[in-house]
Image (cartoon, rainbow, N blue to C red):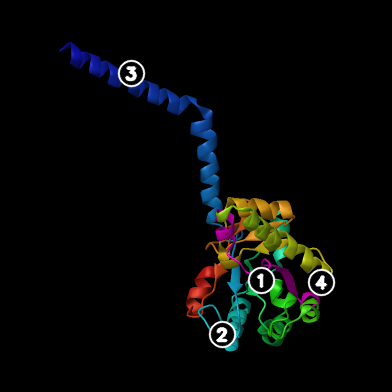
Amino acid sequence: MKKIIILIILIVFSLVISLWLFFNIPEFHNEENIVWKKKENEIKTRLLAIPILLYHNIDGKGAFSMDLPVIRSHFQLFKNKKIRVIKLSELINRLDKPVPFDDRVIVITFDDGFNSMYTKLLPLVKEFQYPVTLFIYSDLFMKMKKTGLNWEKLRYLDKNGIDIQAHSKSHADLVHLSGENTPGSRGNLFREIYLSKKAMEIYLGKEILFFAFPYGKYDLNIVELASVAGYKRVFSTDYGSNIITRNNYSLRRQHIKRNYTLNELEKLIQ
């Protein structure tokens, strides 16, 4: 009988302590819950949630290459749905001073540096007057591979609506290099992240502020190295919009695949 009474007393005591903690610790009950409630409200507001779209080649092969008529239909969809395409730098500036946009906006990016960026994307950019960011890996042009693109054409793109930014030196798997953690791999990371930035700045005659992870892969070490190298923001291929009141250093991009329908694309931008 005594054991039962003691057990009941312990249960009641535990319940009283739990209730006291719940109602009397402001950090738990008030501030933290309020913060999460605010975040939930932010996500539901399209004017705060900005998708960054990621494309690759045009009229090429593979799951991430789009035919020119498909790209055109995407650009036309943005226009028809009154989606405003903004510069990547405008989004970053809004992260620094977070207030909602007055309309629905998106950012368009391309990766790698195919010749179609000059022959096919550039005419579309001029036609629709959409700013685009192109992330390139510098070895593609240092080694004079047969891409049709060169530094002169990249400078022309950069002055005509296609902002050129960094995508590493050789498109290496940076997570693999980071995991090796040897003197050689650390040297390679330095070249991929820092030296590619400096080489691009020399050849393009401008400051390189943004870095897109090759294959979209990253870890905390790579993010920290990019920050030390002087990049203002880095970009993954994690899906989801970017909530501008969060001011994250690593931003998400929506990878647009070849088999996406216009209806699927519309769901991403609405």
Q: CA distance from mark 3 to mark 1?
A: 59 Å
Label 2 crowd bin: few (<14), some (14–19), many (20+), radius 10 Å = some
Name the residue at the left extreme. 1
Q: Amino acid at mark 3?
A: Phe
Instruction: Specify whether residue 2 is in view.
Output: yes
Q: CA distance from mark 1 to mark 4?
A: 31 Å
Nearer to me, 232 or 176 = 176
Label 4 crowd bin: few (<14), some (14–19), many (20+), radius 10 Å = few
Residue 261 locus on image (x, y percent): 48, 79
Nearer to me, 166 or 242 = 166
- In the image, residue 110 above or below residue 3: below
Q: Which residue is mark 1?
A: 84
Q: CA distance from mark 4 to mark 3?
A: 72 Å
The C terminus sits in image quarter: bottom right
Q: Which residue is mark 4?
A: 203
Mark earlier in primary sequence (2, 3):
3
Is label 4 in contact with label 3 (beta carbons under 8 Å)?
Answer: no
121 displayed left or right of 217:
right
Mark earlier in primary sequence (1, 4):
1
Mark earlier in primary sequence (4, 3):
3
Mark nearer the viewer, 4 or 3: 4
The answer to which image quadrant residue 201 occupies is bottom right
186 displayed left or right of 6:
right
Q: Amino acid at mark 4?
A: Tyr
Q: CA distance from mark 2 to mark 3?
A: 67 Å
- Which residues make up the magenta segment? 157-179
Where disc 1 sits, the SS reads strand
- In the image, residue 13 above or below residue 39: above
Q: Which residue is mark 2?
A: 70
